[in-house]
Image (cartoon, rainbow, N blue to C red):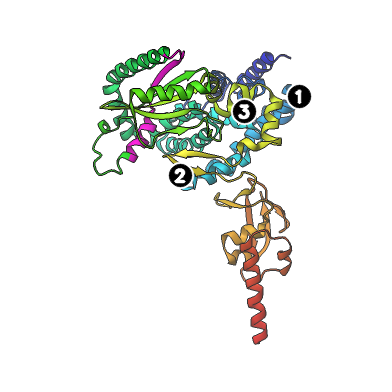
Amino acid sequence: MSNKDIVEKAGSVALKIHENHQRLSGEGYYWHLHRVVELLEENNVNDPEILAGAYLHHVLDSKKYTKENLKKDFGVEIAEIVTEYHRISGNEISSIDPKNYNESIIVQTYLNLIKNPKTLIIRLADKVDNIRSAFVLPKENSRRVAEKAMYLYSPICQLLGIHRFVVELENEAFKILNPGEYYSIEAYLKKKMSEMEVVLKDTAQFVKEILEEKEIQAKVDYRIKHTYSIYKKMQRYRQSKNYKSLNQIYDLAAMRVLVDSVEQCYLTEDILKQAWGVVSGERDDYILHPKPSGYKSIHNTFVISPTMNLEIQIKTKEMHEENEFGLASHTFYKTGAQLKKSFQESPDWITDISFIKNKGDLRIDLFKKYVYVFTPKGDIKQLPRSATPIDFAYSIHKDLGNACVGVAVNDDFQKLSYELKDGDRVEIKILKHKKLPSPDWLDFVKTRKARDEIKKALRKDSDKKELN
C-alpha cells in the first residue's frame, strides 16, 4: 500500500467511525480530524504515519474500533501512535490547572509522558485546531481550553520552535482569557496598520536596494507582531512610570532579510548599522549561539524613524528553511526511522532545553533526570528517577511516610520498593496509629529527604527506649 493510500484509508476509517459523532461545538468530529491533517500538511509535515495517525487519533474513544483493528489495518507503528495518543488524552495531566504550576514542571511532565514524537506533533496540531473554535464553548470550558493552550501547549511549541503554532495558540487563548486587552490592541493596530504598512514597504525596498548596491541579492519581507506578543511588550513598558499608551511602543513590527551565506549575514548587519542607529541591548546572535531548538539568525533592532523601531532578522535562506517549523520541519520528519532514532535513541535535541518567556530564560532540566507522578488529587510530584512510593510519601509529609503500610499505583497494589514511572497515579495507604518507619526502607529509598526522615524517626524511637 502506498503512502497516499495509507492516509486515504485512515481518512475513510475515521469518517466511518465518527459519522454520527459531534463535538461540543456542534460540528461533526470528522471535520476536526480533517483540519488537523490539513494543518500538518500546510506546515510541511508529510510523514504518512503522522497524517494517518492524525485521522485516527480519536478512534479508540469509540467501542467500534480496537487496538487489534489498528494493528491489522495500519501496522504496528501507526497503532502505537494512536494508542499513545489515547493514553495521553486520558492522563491525569489533562485535568490539572496549568496556570497554577511552575511552567517548566508542567511542560517537562507532559513531554516525559510522550514517548513518540509523532504522537506529540499530532497532539499539538489538534490543540491548535481546538483553540480556533473554543469561543463557542461554555465560558468555563473555553477558559480551560485557553489556559492549556497558553500555559502548556504554546510553551511546548516554543521549545520545539514551531512558531506558527505559537502565534495561533497565544492569540486565540489571549482573546478568550483577556478579551478587553485583546480587542484594544487589535483596534490600535487597525488604526495604525496603513501607516505602518507604508513605512515597512518603503523600508523593505530601501534595504533591498542598498544591499543590491553591495552585490547582495536578498529576499526581504516583514510582519506586524502578533497581538499577544505586543501585549507582553505592553507589560514590560508598564513597569515604567512614564508609560501611558501603545503609542510609546515603537517596535511593533519585524523584518526578515534572507541572504545566501553566513558571511553576507554579518555584512548585511554592518550595512544596516551604517544607515540607522540601533537600540542598545536588543542584539542577539543566534548564528554564533543557536537556540536549543537549532534556530539560527542575527536579530538586531534599528531606529528607522522617530516613531518606529524595527527588529530585523538576518539569516541565510537555508537557515530560514530549517527554522520555519523548528524541530518538526520537513527535513526532520522526512524519514520515520531517522525521527524515531533522534527521539528515542539519541534524544540530545530535547535535553537541557530552555525557551524564552518575557525576555527571561526559563530553564528545563534534563528530561531523564526526574520522574513525574500524580497524587490522587491530580497534583504533580517531581522525584528523582528510580524513586519509590516511600520517597513519594515523604515528599508530601513526614507523617505520611512514617504511617505508610502500602501503596496503590494506578489502582493496583505494588511493593513499597516499586520504581515509579512517569504518569503513575500514587495513593499511599496508612495506619493512623503507625508512627515508625521500617529500617528496611533505607535499603531502597532514593531521596535524601526520605532517608533523613526515616533515620530521624528511628533515632528518636531509639532515644525514647533508652530513657525508659
Asked if residue 78 shows in the view, the reply is no
The location of residue 41, given as percent across then percent down, is 57, 18
Q: On the picture, is 126 further left or further right than 440?
A: left
Point out the tag, 1 or 3, that comes first from the N-terminus: 3
Among the 4 quarters of the image, the one containing residue 33? top right
Q: Residue at x 25, y 27 (%)?
A: 306
Front residue of this view, candidates 178 and 364: 364
Label tally: 3
Front residue of this view, candidates 354 and 302: 302
Query: Which mark is on residue 60?
Result: none
Which residues are the magenta region?
214-236
Report which residue position mark 1 lands on. Answer: 72
Q: Is residue 405 above or below residue 116?
A: below
| Whether label 3 touches label 2, CB < 8 Å | no
Amino acid found under the numbered disc labelled 3 = His
Dot 2, crowdedness within 10 Å: few (<14), some or many (≥20)? some
Residues under labels 2 and 1: Cα distance? 41 Å
Asked if residue 420 shows in the view, the reply is yes
Report which residue position mark 3 lands on. Answer: 57
Residues under labels 1 and 3: Cα distance? 16 Å
Quarter of the image with the N terminus is: top right
Q: Secondary structure at mark 1?
A: helix
Point out the tag, 3 or 2, that comes first from the N-terminus: 3
Discs 3/2, front: 2
Farthest residue, direction right: 72
Indicate yes or no whether the magenta region holds residue 322.
no
Q: Is residue 317 above or below residue 387?
A: above
Q: Secondary structure at mark 2?
A: helix
Q: On the picture, is 240 further left or further right than 380?
A: left
The location of residue 294, given as percent across then percent down, is 56, 31
Q: On the picture, is 58 further left or further right than 142?
A: right
Query: Which mark is on residue 99?
Result: 2
